[in-house]
Amino acid sequence: MPNPSSAVSRRTLVTAIGATAAAIATAPAAHAAAPSTTAAPSTPAPAAPGTQAARTVTVPATRARSAAGRAAAGVRTDFPIQYVGVSWDGPRRGGAIRLHHEETGPGSWQPIATGCAGGPDVAGTAAKAAPVSAALVPAGGAVGYDLRLPDGATNLRSTALDTTTGPARTTTLSPTTPVTFCGVEYLSRAAWGADESKRFKNGVENSPAKYYPLQTLTVHHTDTPNADPDPAATVRAIYEYHAITNDWGDIGYHFLIDEAGRIYEGRWSGDDGIPGHDANGNAVTAFHTAGFNSGNLGVALLGTLVNQEPTAKARRSLALVLALAARTHGLDPQAHVTFVNPVNGVTKPVDLISGHRDWLATDCPGGIMYGTLPALRAEVAAL
């Protein structure tokens, strides 16, 4: 069982990650590339000799329209909707959505498959998923939608999201993109277009970062469409849904991985250049397993893995991220441990590399992906 009171120093963290990256250099993960919705970088100002200049790029600003109660059941927009974020209190099964398209009008009713149970950890209380039922539904450019709830459901909330056609927003990238940390490439939050203002509410950070020693690693899928033509836009939709609609203050995962194997930095963890950690090597708390977040690192594969496996590139990047985390923190990828939440004392016996459904009542990370976890643990241990 991991020692919840231990911490990894920054020097140990950097050294261990560097050693792990070197050990797997013979079979690296897919190189990351700039998000497809990021415009061509502007011409950088001349840099001083021997230095590199930062670059500015433009990313579509996220447009959103939120509603609650009766108003949330019938929404029309003046922008194309890529996703509809929906949540309610009550039964997980039985909800339905009907999309409206400008040319064809209302479509047929489709069932809503509620997705991952997430949310913050609460001190002094037992683990509880919140909201009870939630989904991020692809809308394909619809201009409106109607919602139908299961019997007994209350407190409906919905948000229409456009992450591709909004007004251009300028952001600053590091001199090189993608960012490379100890030989491992990933897309920083700025590179995929995270609007950091969304972490704040009324001028105050909504969910200030907290850090704890890492104990476990959890695999998710995002339950979004496969063969995604614009995964960066999907990451921005998840960010908006988690940070604003669900009021978590940030995206719920530490890392996300698309089908091309690109690794996306998730939960904000500071400006020290160590994704997912603070300068002392403790893991930032995210929101991917309500009640079991603190000391638990969440990695989400973009797509739906109910009836199909992840791509080879996505799986390789997943194994890489898990191997880096396990070796850095001295964890055995094939161990069975007792997780102890340092915030509320909740305990859970679980595999060190687990699936979301091992923690909470959810289908995540999809039936096919879940069935491959024993093989994944062996792959990670072999790196």
Image: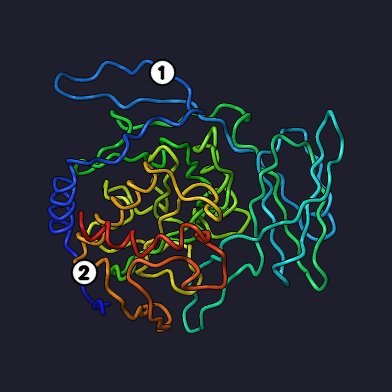
Where is the C terminus found, in terms of image quarters?
bottom left
- Res. 115 image quadrant: bottom right
In the rendering, which numbered label is found on residue 7?
Answer: 2
Can you give x and y, in whole percent of width and height, for residue 8 in the image? 19, 65
Numbered disc in front, either 2 or 1: 2
Under circle 1, the secondary element is loop
- Kind of residue at badge 1: Ser
Q: Residue furthest right?
A: 105
56 and 368: which is toward the camera: 368
Under circle 2, the secondary element is loop
Q: Residue shown at 29%/67% (left/top)?
A: 214
Q: Distance between the residues labelled 2 and 1?
A: 41 Å
Can you give x and y, in whole percent of width and height, for residue 98 in the image? 81, 47
248 and 133: which is toward the camera: 133
Q: Residue shown at 23%/43% (left/top)?
A: 181
Can you give x and y, in whole percent of width and height, for residue 29 in the image? 29, 41
- Res. 233 image quadrant: top right
Q: Eyeballing the image, is 71 above or below 173?
A: below
Q: Is residue 4 left or right of residue 159?
A: left
- Kind of residue at badge 2: Ala
In the picture of the structure, the residue carrying the numbered disc 1 is 42
- Res. 94 image quadrant: bottom right
Can you give x and y, in whole percent of width and height, for residue 16 in the image? 15, 55
Which sits earlier in the primary sequence, circle 2 or circle 1? Answer: 2
Q: Residue shown at 24%/40% (left/top)?
A: 28
Check disc 2: other Cα within 10 Å, few if <14, some if 14-19, many if 20+: some
Q: How many labels does the image show?
A: 2
